[in-house]
Image (cartoon, rainbow, N blue to C red):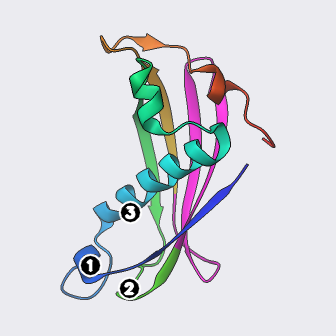
Amino acid sequence: METRLSYRVYLEDTDQLGVVYYANYFKYFERGRSEWLTAVTGHAVASFQQSGILLVVHKVTATFRKPALLWDTIDVVSSFTVESPYRGQFKQRVERAGELLVDAVIDLVALDTNQNLVELPPQLRVTPGA
C-alpha cells in the first residue's frame, strides 16, 4: 500500500538560494514513514516503542534529481515491503505535481530495548495490498 503526504516548503527548509537543503528530505521521509505506519498498521510509532520495539533506519540510498524550492507543494510517497523477518524496506519519493525530485530506499530493522536485533513486529510482516 502506498501513502501520500503533502507539505509546503517553508523558508526554514531551504538554503540561501531557496532550494531545500538536502538533509531536510530525510526529515520528509521520516514523516512519510510515520504516517505510513499509522495508516497501514493502525499503530503509531509511539505504540511500537511502548511495546518495546524500536524501529530504526539501517541503510539509506537516495538519489537527488531536482530540487524542491521555497513555497513548492511537495508530496512524500511511501510504500513498504518485507525483505526478511528482520528487515523491511521503504521505497519513498518526493514529488512536485507528479514530477520526481528525490527517491530513496530505506532499510528498517527492529530492535528491542537493549538494542538487540529482533524480528519485525507482526503488524509489519503482513502489509495489506502489498
Q: Which residue position holds label 1? A: 14
The kind of residue on which mark 1 rests is: Thr
The reply to whether the magenta stretch includes residue 76 is yes
Q: Secondary structure at mark 1?
A: loop
How far is the residue under mark 1 from the one under mark 2? 7 Å
Image spot of residue 82 (x, y percent): 66, 30
Q: Secondary structure at mark 2?
A: loop
The earlier-in-sequence mark between 1 and 2 is 1
Q: CA distance from mark 3 to mark 1?
A: 11 Å
Q: Are marks 3 and 1 in contact (CB under 8 Å)?
A: no
Q: Residues within 10 Å of mark 1 (few under 14, many from 20)?
A: some
Mark 3, other Cα within 10 Å: few <14 / some 14–19 / many ≥20: many
| Magenta segment | 75-103
Whether residue 111 sits left or right of residue 36 in the image: it is left
x, y percent for residue 27: 36, 57
Task: Quickly name the residue at label 3.
Answer: 25
Say which residue label 2 marks: 69
Q: Is residue 95 magenta?
A: yes
Q: Residue at x 58, y 20 (%)?
A: 121
Tell which of 102 and 40 is nearer to you.
40
Mark 3 and mark 2 lie on one chain; the one further toward the N terminus is 3
